[in-house]
Image: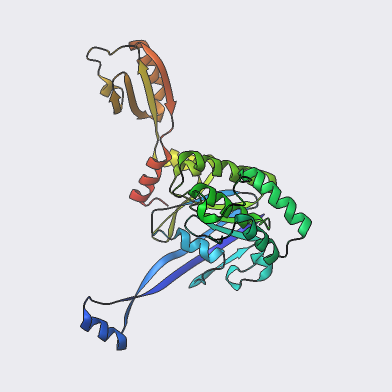
């Protein structure tokens, strides 16, 4: 059963513009000019209960604008959306109590107070039952491993600690739908991995429906079986990212570690040489040719290790933007 349904959703912003200089500034007081910027252009998709969907696109593609409309922060110019049986931009209290939006660059914690105070305020604002709220808070603190920091001032925490506290406070009311906008932005690799692990476990325990935007492909491959790719406000692809890879990157990457350097071996006859560095060689070959090329390499060379991989999702997404594939 779909918990998020979006039908031809669109958003147009009127942006004031003028020439530089003092005279132009004076003219704009009485005759201001505007141009229309179409941030989202007829987007349609649905998300099933418990699904984690990656919402991908370059900067300015319309990802955050779409999520803000679904969270009720923006009113659309056109189209319809239904989330958990509610129209998001009506901002009904019954709706707001069942969703959460977490933005990597936005803070809802008071910098001068310890995190635990913000947690308690959040529980009071959402009128969460005291005992139920206490259990949820303890569970989240344990899952996020933030017990040692919740009594420290927010301003004294590291970025990773602060982000985990932001996630905790956003989930104290146990939302059924989560919109995650760049939740790992700016975090180091270790902290990114911990946040991913938490999101995966929270989804498993509570069956939350999650829409995730990220520039880190590791977030997507670790959490999402399905992706929606958007560019210039339009959806270019919606489906399993493995299917996108098969359509736009019908090749395999073969990585080999050699026992010794071969004398004059023509690797370029086997496939496209992506890397040749010391005793390591990386080739790109057609998917249908991978087995034959692998057999030939093993017969011709003294190989210590050989791996066959699908192309990186970053390469596949770049091709989507370049080709505009629907």
Q: Position of residue 87 (x, y in %)?
A: 61, 69
- Give the answer, above or below, for where 317 lies relative to 5: above
What colouring does the structure picture have? rainbow
Q: Position of residue 308 (x, y in %)?
A: 43, 25
- Residue at position x 51%, y 42% from top? 191
- Residue at position x 34%, y 26% from top? 282
Q: Position of residue 63 (x, y in %)?
A: 46, 58
Relative placement, left or right, of 7 versus 38 is right
**Image quadrant where one finds the N terminus:** bottom right
Give the quarter of the image for residue 287.
top left
Relative placement, left or right, of 96 versus 182 is right
Give the quarter of the image for residue 261.
top left
User: From this viewpoint, is residue 35 visible?
Assistant: yes
- Residue at position x 69%, y 45% from top? 205
Task: Name the foreground residue: 81 vs 119.
Answer: 119
User: From this viewpoint, is residue 224 visible?
Assistant: no
Q: Position of residue 323 (x, y in %)?
A: 34, 49
- Give the answer, above or below, for where 40 lies relative to 260: below
- Residue at position x 31%, y 22% from top? 270
Relative placement, left or right, of 322 versus 170 is left
Task: Name the foreground residue: 215 vs 188.
Answer: 188
């Amino acid at each position: 059963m779909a918990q998020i349904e979006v039908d031809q959703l669109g958003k147009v912003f009127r942006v004031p513009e003028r020439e530089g200089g003092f005279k132009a500034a004076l003219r704009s007081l009485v005759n201001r000019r505007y141009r229309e910027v179409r941030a989202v252009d007829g987007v349609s998709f649905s998300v099933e209960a418990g699904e984690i969907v990656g919402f991908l696109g370059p900067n300015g593609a319309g990802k955050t604008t779409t999520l803000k409309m679904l969270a009720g922060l923006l009113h659309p110019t056109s189209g319809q959306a239904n989330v958990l049986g509610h129209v998001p931009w009506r901002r009904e209290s019954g709706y707001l109590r069942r969703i959460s939006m977490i933005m990597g660059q936005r803070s809802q914690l008071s910098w001068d107070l310890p995190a635990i105070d913000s947690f308690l305020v959040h529980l009071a604002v959402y009128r969460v039952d005291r005992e139920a709220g206490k259990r949820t808070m303890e569970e989240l603190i344990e899952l996020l491993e933030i017990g040692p920091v919740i009594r420290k001032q927010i301003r004294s925490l590291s970025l990773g600690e602060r982000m985990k506290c932001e996630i905790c406070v956003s989930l104290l009311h146990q939302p059924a739908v989560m919109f995650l906008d760049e939740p790992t932005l700016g975090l180091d690799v270790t902290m990114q991995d911990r946040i991913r692990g938490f999101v995966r476990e929270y989804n498993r325990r509570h069956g939350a429906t999650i829409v995730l935007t990220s520039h880190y492909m590791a977030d997507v491959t670790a959490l999402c079986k399905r992706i929606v790719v958007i560019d210039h406000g339009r959806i270019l692809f919606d489906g399993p990212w493995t299917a996108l890879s098969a359509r736009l990157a019908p090749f395999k990457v073969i990585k080999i570690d050699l026992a010794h350097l071969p004398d004059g071996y023509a690797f370029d006859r086997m496939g496209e040489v992506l890397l040749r560095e010391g005793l390591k060689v990386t080739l790109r070959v057609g998917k249908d040719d991978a087995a034959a090329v692998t057999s030939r390499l093993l017969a011709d060379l003294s190989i210590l290790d050989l791996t066959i991989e699908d192309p990186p999702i970053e390469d596949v997404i770049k091709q989507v933007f370049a080709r505009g594939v629907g």
